[in-house]
Image: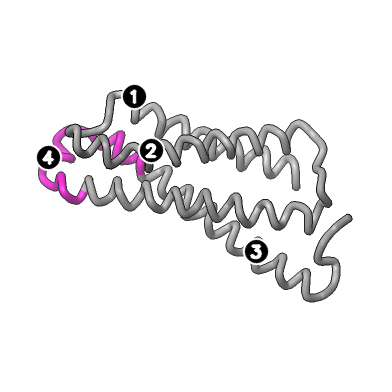
Amino acid sequence: MKIGVNAGGSVIFLVLKTVHLLALVFGAAASLGNIYLLLARGPADLPAPALVGALRKWYRLTALGAIVTLWATGLVMTPMKHGWRVEGFAFNAKVALAGLLLAIIFYLNWMSARWARRGGPPSYVPALHVAGATSLLLAVLFAVAAFG
């Protein structure tokens, strides 16, 4: 059974898809921003440590807002367009990678205050940012394969 097959449903779907794609753009910007900060370590960090810290905070919060929005809109759009069950490896891989990305983002946001009190994040945090960016990219590729 599909939801939203009338004219009003298609407008709702269009709005949801627009919000979904905008959240994807913001999530990608946050993910790439963290990677750029990771690559810019060294002398570039020294003149403006407050700016780098602020950017990390905004990227972290942007990623959190984006992933929550992506999940919320995706959970509403999927049954509207494809019914309650979507078959195939690509869809299952997309959901698994999006779940991993959600876990990474929630963990980073949850632990950030504790790490700030301790003097900074542990050494494995850059690897989590790389894993998150990789998960995002792969999830998008599998979404394209699953939904065309």
Q: Which residues are magenta?
A: 34-51
- In primary-sequence order, the first of circles 3 and 2 is 3
Name the side, left or right, on which 39 lies relative to 32.
Answer: left
Mark 2 or mark 1, whichever is nearer to me: 2
Residue 45 figure quarter = top left
Name the side, left or right, on which 63 lies relative to 16.
Answer: left
Where is residue 52 drawn, in percent x and y? 22, 46
Residue 16 marker: 3
Residue 46 marker: 4
Q: Label 1, on which residue?
A: 124
- In primary-sequence order, the first of circles 2 and 1 is 2
Question: In the current view of this chain or complex, which residue is farthest to the right?
Answer: 1
Residue 108 marker: 2
Question: In the current view of this chain or complex, which residue is farthest to the top?
Answer: 123
Residue 141 sits above or below residue 148 on the image: above
Classify mark 4: helix, strand or loop: loop
Residue 107 sits above or below residue 29 on the image: above
Q: Foreground residue, 41 or 82?
A: 82
Assess whether mark 4 and mark 3 are in contact (beta carbons under 8 angstroms): no
Q: CA distance from mark 3 to mark 1?
A: 35 Å
Amino acid carrying label 1: it is Tyr
Classify mark 1: helix, strand or loop: loop
Name the side, left or right, on which 22 lies relative to 84.
Answer: left
Mark 3 or mark 2, whichever is nearer to me: 2
| Residue drawn at 22 percent across, 39 percent down | 116
Q: Foreground residue, 140 or 106?
A: 106
- In primary-sequence order, the first of circles 4 and 2 is 4
| Residue drawn at 44 percent across, 41 percent down | 106
- In primary-sequence order, the first of circles 3 and 1 is 3
Q: CA distance from mark 2 to mark 1?
A: 11 Å
